[in-house]
Image (spheres, rainbow, N blue to C red):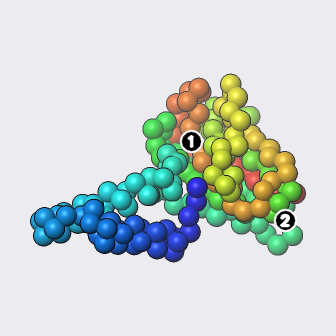
Amino acid sequence: MRLELRAFQKLVKRICSQATNKGTVSRADKTSKGGLMKKQFLILFTLVSLAFPTASFGQKAVRVKFAKGATEAITTGSLKGYKSKAVVFMIRVKAGQTLSVEQLMSDNSTNYATFGITNPSGEDVTDAEANCNNRKTIENTAAGDYRIEVTECAKADAWSGSFKVKFTVK
């Protein structure tokens, strides 16, 4: 479930004020050093954990932009090994389009990446196979932002370095 930042802030304020007003925070908690803050932090932490369940929490997404009239865009990124954080791309599509994501590699490259793709409602649409999953086509897309997380393929030889990804939307 994705929440807009403003709606999320309102929800946190409402829950914290309800906890204080309904007596769930005792007088001792209010006067003890940090008692109320600890409860508010726990509520906030729980809500953030529910709102952002991906492994790359805190990763800033790179917005994929197309030249005017273009249906393809090529982006680059770099990884620093298998346990490094994912590189995250966001791409906005319209309903009913076809989105293709493909790793571009030279003929002798063994730097395989894996794509994790999430649709606008937060569902994983990767359909992981036995391969490294570095090519994916999604037909009949839902309108909104698709999130593509690029990581090093755990099934291939370890590597670190740069990669290229081609995004196609038709």
Give the residue number, with chain letter if any, for mark 2.
70
Q: Which residue of the protein is positioned furthest toward the front in this rendering?
A: 22
Give the residue number, with chain letter if any, for mark 1.
151
Q: Nearer the viewer, residue 21 or 3?
A: 21
Cβ–Cβ under 8 Å for marks 1 and 2: no
Residue at 77% from the left image edge and 61% from the top image edge = 143
Quadrant (top left, top right, bottom left, bottom right) of the N terminus: bottom right
Left or right, 118 with reference to 47? right
Q: Could you say where residue 84 lies in the image, as x and y percent from the top left?
A: 46, 43
Residue at 56% from the left image edge and 69% from the top image edge = 4
Quadrant housing residue 167: bottom right
Considering only vertical position in the picture, is 41 above or below 140? below
Three-letter code for the amino acid on which mark 2 is drawn = Ala
Residue at 41% from the left image edge and 71% from the top image edge = 14
Residue 34 visible in the displayed image: no
Considering only vertical position in the picture, is 96 above or below 136? below
Tell me the SS state at disc 1: strand
Tell me the SS state at disc 2: loop
What whole-number distance in Å separates the C-alpha atoms at marks 1 and 2? 27 Å
Quadrant (top left, top right, bottom left, bottom right) of the C terminus: bottom right
Quick one: label 2, few (<14), some, or many (20+) residues within 10 Å? few
